[in-house]
Amino acid sequence: MAALHKMERLHRVTRSGFTVIELIVVMVVVSIVMAMALPRVDITRYRADGRVQIVRKAVQQAQRTSLVRQHDVIISFDTVRQRMRVALDANNDGSISSTEIITWQALSDGGKFAIPSIRVDGSSKPSNPIDAAALKTVTGMPSIVFHRDGSVSADVVIYFSSALASPTEFRAVRVLQGTGRTDWYRFNGTVWSPGAL
């Protein structure tokens, strides 16, 4: 009888944990769900939005520098090498000398300055990815100048995309002349919509 009670107690012991087979089944189910979900994640959108951060940050930093240093700051757009040059024009002569502070900022992840099918305001196709009525040219590159009061030399819209230039990867940063304020926009293939970061 004692042996029977001992066997009953062994059978009553509750099982804790999972068996190897149960763990394998769960891993297989999770793998199948991930395989179906991952192709639907649009990583290119996040890369395009990352380029917005780079361009906006360079423009906003140039404006802050012009206010703090009380010198003009020239931003030039190298549309061949897909980068921006930011130069502190310490003598405010509108040109860049070798003694002035110059930094370069590249567009990331294969980004490039590109021309979209329509402008941010919905009008015709721009002729240049750096779209402004009165752009300066400094050392052969289209440029804008932030003045000591924070204003910029012209209203400008900067268009860029990925190397593939897919319509939904186009982004734009608009800089207002009077205040230097920056806004950004996302293109869905037919219309531009304001972005929010």
Image (cartoon, rainbow, N blue to C red):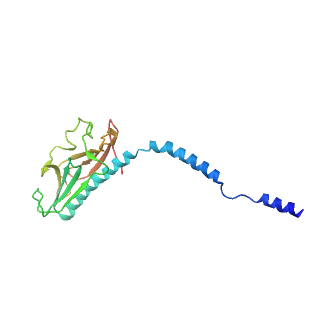
The answer to whether residue 179 is seen in the rendering is: no
Side (left or right) of 148 relative to 185: left
Total number of numbered discs in the rendering = 0
* The residue positioned farthest toward the left in the image shown: 93
Which of the 4 quarters of the picture holds residue 188? top left
Side (left or right) of 35 relative to 63: right
The answer to whether residue 135 is seen in the rendering is: yes
Which of the 4 quarters of the picture holds residue 73? bottom left
Side (left or right) of 169 relative to 115: right
Above or below, comparing residue 116 to residue 30 in the picture: above
**Which residue is found at the position 28% from the left and 55% from the top?**
57
Which is nearer the eye, 107 or 136? Answer: 107
* Image location (x, y in percent) of residue 172: 28, 45
**Which residue is found at the position 12% from the left and 58% from the top?**
96
Which is nearer the eye, 184 or 29? Answer: 29
* Image location (x, y in percent) of residue 190: 32, 35
Please identify the quadrant where the N terminus is shown: bottom right
Which of the 4 quarters of the picture holds residue 147? bottom left
* Image location (x, y in percent) of residue 140: 13, 49
**Which residue is found at the position 23% from the left and 52% from the top?**
83
* The residue positioned farthest toward the right in the image shown: 1
* Image location (x, y in percent) of residue 130: 21, 45
